[in-house]
Image (tube, rainbow, N blue to C red):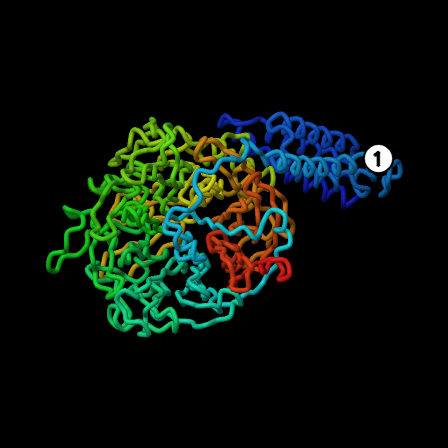
Amino acid sequence: MTWFRSTSPLLVLTALLLLIIGLALAGPGLYLLALGGTWYYAAAGLLTLVSAGLIGAGRRSGLWVYALMLLMTVIWAVSRVGLDGWRLLPPIAFPAGIGLWVFGPWVAGRLSSATRRTSLNATVYAGMGGCLLLFALMFTFGWTITASRYTQVSPFPERMIAHNAVGAEAEQKDDWQFYGGAPSGQRFSPLTQITARNAASLEPAWSFHTGDMPLPGENTRGREFSFEATPIKIGDKLFFCTPHRDVVALDATTGKQIWKYRAQGNMSKNTYQACRGVSYYDASASVEAGAPCVHRVISTVSGSPPTLIALDAETGRLCPGFGQNGVVDLQQNMGPMPPGFHFITSPPMVMNDRIMLSGWVFDNQTVDEPSGVIRAFDARTGALSWAWDLGHTPANRPLKPDEVFTRGTPNGWGVYTADPALNLVYVPLGIATPDYFGGKRRDFDDRFGSSLVALDMTTGEEKWHFHTTHHDLWDFDIPVGPSLIDLPDSQGNTVPALVQTTKQGELFVLDRRTGKPFYRVEEKNVPQGNIPGERYAPTQPFSVDMPNLRTHPLDTDWLWGATPFDQMACKIQFHKLRYDGLYTPPSLEGSIGFPAFDGVADWYGASVDPQTGVLYVNTTFIPFLMKLVPQGKALREGLYKPWKGWGHRYPEPDFIYNPQHGLPYGAIIKSWLGIFGAPCIAPPWGETQAIDLVTRKVIWHRPIGTTKNVGHTGEPRMPIGLPTGIFSMGGTVNTASRLIFMGATADQGFRVIDGRNGKILYEREMNAGANATPLTYMGRDGRQYIVIAVGGHGGLQTRNGDEVVAFALPEHQGAQP
């Protein structure tokens, strides 16, 4: 053949490389063009093929054709995305990297030399220099665009709308008695020792290792081991739970262990090994002073069966007067409950002598799953006080003999918040499982699914409920209770309100006494589906007076990838899949969910400054793919195994396959990633935002986090940190000095942010993922401490660890006289 007449093996290998690249671009590129997509990939592939042929024939003109392809790439990319360096990376970085070889002395040097020997000449310098310049410009523009996205939209408010947090009695005692500080869930502290001026001086003050690490198989096949706990502080002690449900008491100032309760029970079938926190009960009104268990730590154990336990806060021993020797069996009256099908991940709400909880159920496996019943137990004895069961009328009526709680009802798995003055607890409800096909849901399932419910803590009587999603087909359950805040109305009156974050990015602000919208909510038409047997809500509620937390809608110019190949693959999928924006329903051909079940904001919710009326929240932007598969087809293809029902061993499927046994369709749900594992959407992938709840305006928003340490468990991780903004799991805490403390990001960072303007004042890379919400308090040494769990998150696949880490100012700087 004359095509490879060159005697240089390097030229032959270069031609073969370009041939493969050209074919990989041209073939799929032509298919994309036929689908109505861009012409670019086909054109780039054809030019690369021509370059391959000419270089293989030993012709210098092959260099000019490759240079033309690069020039065309730059012009096309800039015309589509401007000078956004991170969006320029997929089309330009790979061909520019190949260009460093093509224009190197071993290829271009030979072809542009009269002797056809390796040489350095003007062609080499120009070609390699041009490719290096492209890299320099991409990264320069990337950093520049990151800075430009750090945006101060509105001024930080100077006004004060309140002086104390709602239900701040615990905070006034310098305790952090609830997951969110006070029962209001504001995650606010009045402490001011750490300020914008001295935050850069923070240092680790102590750390504690729990010894609780993932067991084999607990971070594979969609199983998740996550250290999500936020400790509570009572007096001089911290109390928290580990993923395997050990309960630990530490000295709040030194971090030294006081006691540890080792949980019992088989947890091996649990999809999630996670525990977000424990609760506290002061039994001094009913227990004699000096007797055991005057002060109690309330927790749950996720074994089989799941249990509720009360521990003596002084010794860590089970309280004998509570339940059966300190333990309440939560399987009572629940019917069939195979291991792993029901347990509790969030701390119970303890208020007014009641312990209230619901729990997590194994989503999307089958109809007739364990009940989502909300139950309250007497905090003194452990006896059942009431149960709120959607299938009963009234919902809080006592069970009849041999009756079980209604199967498959919406559950409340997230952290609860409460208003002690109103004696109301606010329960964020999920969906009647399975999630992605609702054709067989009952009336009461749809009436209460994905709604916020206010219950009387003493009786379990419903006071009101508010729907955030109608007939939910997206797993847009409410993942956390609202933050309570008192807001001024248009007449200047103070109204007890709440703000509810949602997975879909809406912020609903309601009167917490009545559940009526404090700011307008409108029903808007949403996309409809065509699955036989399904029904679709024609409208969904939108909080039209509030900014939403979503980013831009998807379009082809926002599609991304690590290389042009996976970016092109994402574009092909985009043209083949259904995407009609928010509330695109699941379909047989496949739909893009954006946001999806991980949401814009998940179980960590927001923190609220009650003094200024400012809300802070971490947001994540990752699309998911949703596809319904007829049951017969799914079983034939082996997506999951058949199941004969309760009483038979359950064949647990891989995480992305949702059997939905008992329904006509299973579902495949997975992150939308390119063929090399990069997201199909361009950065930023995560932000932190500040929103004024009085003016209803965004104050600032900024990308948060870098690509450093991002990767999969057991695989190499990104060694460098590009400031793209990264996905997160974990919440914020804010203080009266207008600071925000957070971990959360997938890059394993801990940060302090100026709440007034979003500037990062302090950041530190941790040994593992700090994917929890911190707390802050004053130690007995006069120093303000910020404490966070550093143990990783199975969903984000951050590194696992077993640390609890405390930060403080240096002793000479932080201690108060």
10 Å neighbourhood of mark 1: few (<14), some, or many (≥20)? many
Considering only vertical position in the picture, is 548 above or below 343? above
State the image coordinates of residue 193 (x, y, percent, origin top left): 56, 53
Residue at 60% over, 40% down: 563
Judge whether residue 301 can be spotted in this image. yes
Secondary structure of the residue carrying numbered label 1: loop
**Residue that numbered label 1 is attached to:** 112
Tell me the quarter of the picture where residue 496 sits.
top left
Residue at 31% over, 74% down: 291
State the image coordinates of residue 814 (x, y, percent, origin top left): 60, 58
State the image coordinates of residue 621 (x, y, percent, origin top left): 49, 40
Q: Residue furthest left?
A: 401
How many marks on residues? 1
Residue at 27% over, 38% down: 514
Considering only vertical position in the picture, is 293 above or below 542? below
Judge whether residue 635 can be spotted in this image. no
Image quarter in which the N terminus is found: top right
- In the rendered view, does 252 fall on the left or right side of 451? right
Residue at 72% over, 44% down: 13
- In the rendered view, does 205 fall on the left or right side of 188? right
Of the pair 427 and 655, the residue shown nearer to us: 427
Residue type marked 1:
Ser
State the image coordinates of residue 226 (x, y, percent, origin top left): 45, 58
- In the rendered view, does 362 fall on the left or right side of 133? left
Tell me the quarter of the picture where residue 321 sits.
bottom left
Image quarter in which the C terminus is found: bottom right
Of the pair 737 and 524, the residue shown nearer to us: 737
Q: Residue furthest front?
A: 817
Of the pair 674 and 448, the residue shown nearer to us: 448
